[in-house]
Image: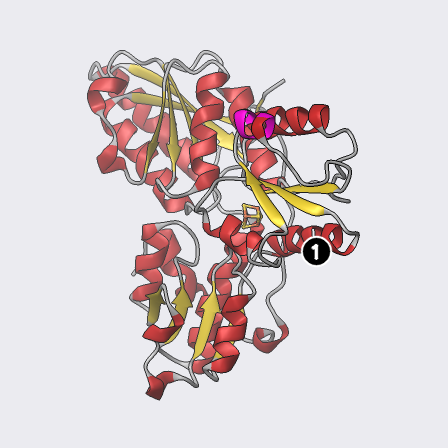
Amino acid sequence: MMALDTGRAPSPIEAQLRELREWMTTIGKPALEIRLCAPRGFCAGVDRAIQIVLMALKKYGAPVYVRHEIVHNRYVVKGLESRGAVFIEDLAEIPAEHRAQPVIFSAHGVPRSVPVEADARKLFYLDATCPLVSKVHKQALRHLRAGRHVVLVGHAGHPEVIGTMGQLPYGSVSLVETVADAQAYAPQDPEALGFVTQTTLSLEDAAGVLDALKRRFPAIAAPAAESICYATTNRQEAVRQAAPGCDLFVVVGAPNSSNSRRLVEVAERSGAARAVLVQRAAEIDWDMAEGCSVVGLSAGASAPEILVDEIIGAFSERFCVALEIAETTVEEENFPVMRALRGTELAPSDLAFLHGQA
Ligand code: SF4
């Protein structure tokens, strides 16, 4: 059951909204309940990756190069760019005179060829791969060492999938995306298979694909630990509980953020009349919001809370908003940064851009 957290003291934003609602009622704005999912937004892996970039900027000075978007969110990327991070897709883009500056690998992980290339180019790199993605890499390698062909359940082209496939020698891993793929899959040795999954899949979709694989290949070995991460599981569960009865469900996240897109699907499947992915309040289609009385709200693991506040603010300009916190669990995960950066202290001003301050 969804726990609507109504028995505690209101937070400052809730108190402000209550006052605003009372005032708006007097001027005839329509009432709206926003069900705000908790947990939502930043996970421990994203938090760690952003800290790594900020700490590297502090310790080594600008520029700090980052291979691929450190996390899939333009607001975060732009904020880091304004502090001296330079985002690149190819290590060859780093000018020779900046080789001593660090290059950071994104939270999604990279193929083994990337650190090898960095070494060959004599670059100094810091790997911000989320520890839970690294764990999937290790599980895949464990299958390989046990003589199994690896089946990776995930989405083609996603950087995490490219990174996981790139841990293994060519030909030793197959990507399966859908139930239809699992039904058509023809391995060389059906008795020597092991699977892992992308960390950000829909739990429901992954279960369907894995059921199909297990039905066809009963000997397929599972990884020692669940590959879909705690943050994906918790955000999807919170949306699943909050979605029934919502006229509209808004997920804050980027179109290339896999976990955010999955939240939209979960909301639609769990009873929201419709669900949309938006990056900023400016993307909300207000015609769609007209006539709504209950709106669900969540954010993908790479979306900062400031963007959630912005969405609530935009709804509050048009509706008398009552905010209900739909909390399903409390997260306490925290991943430490690598040894090279330990002891580099971040001041509140370093993180201010994530709270909307310059
Ligand atoms: Fe790590 Fe999960 Fe966050 Fe991805 S979504 S960075 S795997 S905690």
Q: Residues within 10 Å of mark 1 (few under 14, many from 20)?
A: some
Q: For this view, does 178 lie left or right of residue 18?
A: right
- Which residue is found at the position 38% from the left and 52% from the top? 355
* Viewer-nearest residue: 206 or 168: 168
- Which residue is found at the position 51% from the left and 21% from the top? 242
**Residue at the spot of label 1:** 141
- Which residue is found at the position 53% from the left and 63% from the top? 128
Q: For this view, does 84 lie left or right of residue 140?
A: left
Beta carbon of the mark 1 residue lies under 8 A of ligand 1: no
* Viewer-nearest residue: 328 or 217: 217
Which quadrant is home to the C terminus? bottom left
The amino acid type of the residue labelled 1 equals Leu
* Viewer-nearest residue: 280 or 68: 68
Residue 204 picture location, percent across and down: 58, 25
Residue 293 picture location, percent across and down: 35, 13
State whether residue 85 is above or below residue 291.
Answer: below
Residue 132 picture location, percent across and down: 63, 51
State whether the magenta stretch is mostly helix, strand or loop.
Answer: helix
Q: Which residues are magenta?
A: 179-183
Residue 341 picture location, percent across and down: 56, 75
Mark 1, secondary structure of its residue = helix
Asked if residue 165 can be seen in this view, the reply is: yes
Q: Is 219 within the magenta? A: no
Task: Please identify the quarter of the rendering in which residue 207 is found.
Answer: top right
Q: For this view, does 47 lie left or right of residue 169?
A: left
State whether residue 277 is above or below residue 322.
Answer: below
